[in-house]
């Protein structure tokens, strides 16, 4: 860039220092532009806005102008230099370390920034990969149909007169109970209910409740003693024994529908055969996707393990923080308090390893995309949009908005799939059938 001198120093892996000096002539050009911009809005007594002489503006607006001159000089020189020198920099890493010489007309500044890693791309063709094959078997279909039955189950009044010992181990027996818990004669509202539905076989149901209900009839009340778990949210009550007044209101049984044509029709299918065929197709799609994802992970693991190069410090720290924030949000969503969130050393190491792997793969895949000249076409983007529209025909407006906001993410996914397909097409695949016998 004319009027600019640059000294570039490698101070660490993926880190450069640039000392940039600007000639007096170029600096003067930036100064004039700044003062002319100020002149458009400057206000001084005796002059209309836009008509204040430049000499007066330079006199009265000097502190404001100096800051703007510095910003303009840096913005109009730094990024041109980075482009001219073909420096692939990390934008968020740019740090101005020093500025000098504005008054002496010998302006210079120093910048430290991170750069994208330079490395030699290792072979990604001819890989030996294991591809698992999984076919749907009748047991898979039966298990899925059973889940549908459970989902369509109904609770009906039981003809049982009382709760038996055998009922405690049956998945289909439920009780409606009232229980009032007291501690030192005071009711504990958080451990009481007027109308609670419980499943007797539920492993989370305290054994004191299960044993207490055995032999009880509808309307009967019994006093039991219950020990509160040690991990209870209120530490003052943890591990304490409390008194419970337990009343059996009703006994119910879970009634499962019969699997026949009527059952299939209720679910929206023509008949039972149509239901079976649809379930088989759905399960096969799920298996295929799971195994394709597993094959993709095998490829990504190989690429990450085969390459070893330094990573940009700023980008690595930012990625770590993103992952930590994600863990924190998950912790809070499960009821944890933000101030209690803390990572163990092992968890911190896992986050660091994941951040390193994700950034490393980003640059490996970028290099493959460049080497293979892979580009996403408009037709591919429209095809992706079409898939969503097919699934959600009534949401065209929201899908269009989603594409506009997430076009980079969608494009990245398409590029990733193209790279994976390319590697698979050029690999030696050994298929392994893992279908249950």
Image (spheres, rainbow, N blue to C red):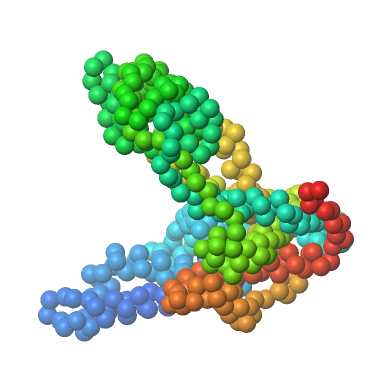
Question: What's the residue at 61%, 38% (across, down)?
Answer: 349
Q: Residue 101 location in percent, x, y?
A: 44, 61
Picture mark count: 0
Q: Is residue 282 left or right of 225 when viewed as pictured?
A: right
Residue 135: name its quadrant: bottom right
Q: In this view, does 197 lie to the left or right of 436?
A: left
Pick the residue in front: 107 or 391.
391
Q: Is residue 395 above or below residue 98?
A: below
For residue 20, side relative to residue 122 (left or right): left
Q: Residue furthest left?
A: 46
Is residue 169 something one can see in this rendering? yes
Q: Residue at x 44, y 59 (%)?
A: 100
Residue 426 falls left or right of residue 177: right
Identify whether 355 is placed above or below 89: above
Residue toward you, 21 or 221: 221
- How far from the left and from the top, in percent, is residue 260? 60, 59
Q: Is residue 278 visible?
A: no
Q: In which quarter of the image is the N terminus?
A: bottom right
Residue at 46% in and 49% down = 154
- Measuring from the top left, give residue 181's x and y in whole percent: 30, 24
Residue 281 screen position, x and y as percent: 68, 64
Q: Which residue is drawn at 12% across and 76% down?
A: 45
Residue closest to the eye, 296 or 150 = 150
């Amino acid at each position: 860039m004319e009027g600019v001198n640059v000294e570039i120093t490698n101070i660490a892996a993926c880190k450069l220092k640039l000392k940039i000096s600007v000639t007096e002539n170029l600096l003067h050009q930036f100064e004039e532009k700044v003062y002319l911009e100020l002149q458009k809005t400057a206000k001084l007594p005796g002059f209309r806005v836009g008509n204040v002489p430049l000499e007066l503006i330079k006199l009265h607006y000097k502190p404001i102008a100096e800051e703007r001159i510095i910003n303009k000089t840096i913005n109009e020189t730094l990024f041109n230099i980075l482009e001219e020198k073909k420096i692939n920099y990390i934008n968020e890493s740019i740090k101005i370390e020093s500025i000098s010489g504005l008054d002496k007309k010998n302006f210079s500044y120093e910048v430290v920034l991170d750069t994208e890693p330079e490395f030699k791309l290792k072979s990604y063709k001819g890989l030996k990969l294991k591809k698992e094959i999984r076919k749907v078997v009748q047991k898979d279909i039966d298990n899925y149909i059973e889940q549908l039955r459970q989902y369509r189950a109904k609770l009906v009044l039981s003809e049982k007169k009382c709760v038996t010992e055998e009922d405690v181990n049956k998945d289909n027996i439920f009780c409606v109970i009232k229980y009032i818990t007291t501690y030192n004669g005071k009711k504990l509202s958080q451990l009481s209910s007027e109308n609670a539905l419980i499943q007797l076989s539920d492993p989370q149901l305290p054994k004191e409740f299960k044993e207490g209900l055995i032999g009880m009839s509808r309307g009967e009340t019994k006093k039991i003693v219950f020990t509160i778990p040690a991990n209870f949210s209120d530490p003052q009550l943890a591990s304490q024994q409390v008194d419970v007044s337990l009343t059996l209101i009703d006994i119910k049984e879970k009634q499962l529908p019969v699997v026949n044509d009527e059952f299939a029709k209720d679910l929206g299918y023509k008949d039972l055969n149509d239901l079976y065929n649809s379930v088989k197709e759905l399960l096969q799609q799920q298996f295929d996707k799971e195994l394709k994802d597993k094959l993709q992970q095998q490829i990504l693991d190989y690429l990450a393990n085969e390459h070893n190069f330094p990573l940009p410090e700023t980008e690595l720290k930012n990625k770590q923080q993103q992952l930590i924030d994600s863990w924190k949000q998950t912790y809070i969503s499960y009821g944890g308090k933000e101030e209690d969130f803390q990572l163990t050393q092992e968890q911190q190491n896992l986050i660091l390893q994941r951040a390193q792997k994700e950034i490393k793969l980003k640059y490996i895949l970028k290099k493959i995309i460049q080497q293979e000249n892979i580009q996403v076409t408009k037709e591919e983007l429209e095809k992706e949009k079409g898939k969503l529209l097919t699934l959600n025909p009534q949401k065209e407006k929201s899908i269009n908005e989603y594409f506009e906001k997430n076009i980079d993410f969608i494009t990245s996914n398409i590029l990733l799939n193209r790279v994976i397909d390319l590697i698979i097409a050029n690999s030696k695949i050994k298929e392994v059938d893992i279908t249950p016998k």
